[in-house]
Amino acid sequence: MVKYDMTREEREDKSRRIREKGEATRLRHASMRPLTVELKLDLKCLNNAERNKLFLFFAECRWLCNHLLGLSNDMFRGFDTRTRCITSLDKDGNTVQRELTMPAKFIQTVYTSLKQDMASLAAKRRKTGKRNGKLKFRSSYDSIELNQYGDTHWICFGPSGNKHGKYKNTIHIVGIKRLIRTFGMEQIPAGAEYANAKLVKKPSGIYLMLTCYIQKHEDSTESETKPDLGIDFGIKTAITTSDGEKYDISVRESERLKGLQRKLARQKKGSRGWYSTKLLIRREYEKLANRRRAKANQVYHDIVTGRKLVVMQYENIKGWHKGLFGKEVQSSALGTLRRKLMSNPDVLVIDRFFPSTKMCPICGHMHESIALSDRIFACPICGYTEDRDVKSAKTLLLAGKHEIACRCPGQTPTPVERMSGFDASYEGHGSVLR
């Protein structure tokens, strides 16, 4: 087969057409809403050779990633993505020659992702002025980028789906000739436009994280408007709101997981049974993570839906995990919920040093002698009595409303002598909102 080399004019014309097509796609997606769905691949429809080849793609990506990290800067910049022969280290640290059999698109995505990671590290170093280390060698590579729909992957819904629709609910992945059955196709809405995807390896199997774009629909019916809310993070009660509602988002370890851990401790390390038990343990941890994430998503939806303002405090969850309550924090989804809330523009985050537990929401008195065992807050000045966590949530809500009122344009600050007791105490504390 004779390889055809394009002339300079043909190459420039091809680059121009690709650039124009990309700009048109980005412009069209700007008016649409992105949606990511998780599709599980049914590997039982593949034979052993195809199944091993699919898992080998992840191993070869790890080999290539570590090979690139071991190159010097000049050799990394001049790396040719058409390279197939690389060197890597085995489990004993010996140098081994490897021959890559994965598609060229995978080689390009691994190289591009490493370039982006190095650029991000360099930008952070320039911004902070500090040395932040370098990328480390990877012991596993569990995500492969599929960046071109119709080339690296495509979806088949059946005879009426598209030109590849010979079989129903199947997917094609570059490098695998046979179509692969998938579970979860019902998540994709009708009329969705498919985009890039990621091939993700988990203990329970291989998944396809498909990104698609759907049209934005304006809701004609106004959603129910709920009052502003303050939320307090805790250990005994994970989430307490200013309305008095409490949420428990902890998921304990199952008895099966504890039994598998005891079984692993009795087995010989490195044996076949030891690796089988370790895989079962990883699957149990994946189930726990899914349940905790589901609880965090449900609580997040209940908190932010229909509200214009939610006030929370930036709690030191990492410090809680290192303290006496590490097991309680470990089994909860506080970190996931905090991250989701902080990414919402309607959520106001108060500095973690603000004394929401000690401050009275009525008179602003600082109750310095309150202990952790005191579950009821009783103000010695005004006589206000309330549940400790509910009171903290109400204090945070008042602090958030006070800060928003002070940010209004053209508003003159109220003198301290005209303020309520809480406002004066809040101004005196000088808390900073993040």
Image (spheres, rainbow, N blue to C red):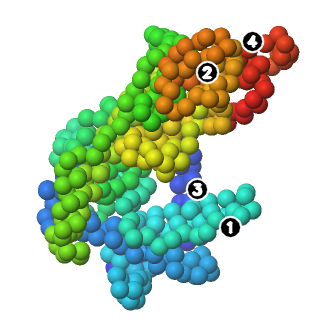
State which mark lies toward you, 2 or 3: 2
State which mark lies toward you, 1 or 4: 4
Looking at this view, is 13 or 127 the one in front?
Answer: 127
Residue type marked 3: Arg
Q: Are marks 4 and 2 in contact (CB under 8 Å)?
A: no
Q: Is residue 270 in view?
A: yes
Q: Are marks 4 and 3 in contact (CB under 8 Å)?
A: no
Q: Are marks 2 and 3 in contact (CB under 8 Å)?
A: no
* Residue located beneath label 4 in the image: 420
| Residue that appears at 43% across and 75% down | 64
Residue 156, image quadrant: top left
Q: Is residue 324 above or below residue 360?
A: below
Q: Is residue 163 above or below residue 3?
A: above
Q: How far is mark 4 from mark 3, CA to CA? A: 65 Å
Which numbered dot is residue 395?
2
Q: Earlier in the sequence, mark 1 or mark 2?
A: 1
Q: Return the x and y of residue 361 as percentages of the image width and height.
A: 64, 17
Which numbered dot is residue 16?
3
Q: Return the x and y of residue 389 as percentages of the image width and height.
A: 50, 24
Q: Earlier in the sequence, mark 4 or mark 3?
A: 3
Q: How far is mark 1 from mark 4, CA to CA? A: 48 Å
State which mark lies toward you, 1 or 2: 2
Looking at this view, is 407 or 161 the one in front?
Answer: 407
Q: How far is mark 2 from mark 3, CA to CA? A: 59 Å
| Residue that appears at 57% across and 49% down | 20
Helix or strand or loop: what does disc 1 sit on?
Answer: loop
Looking at this view, is 425 or 16 the one in front?
Answer: 425
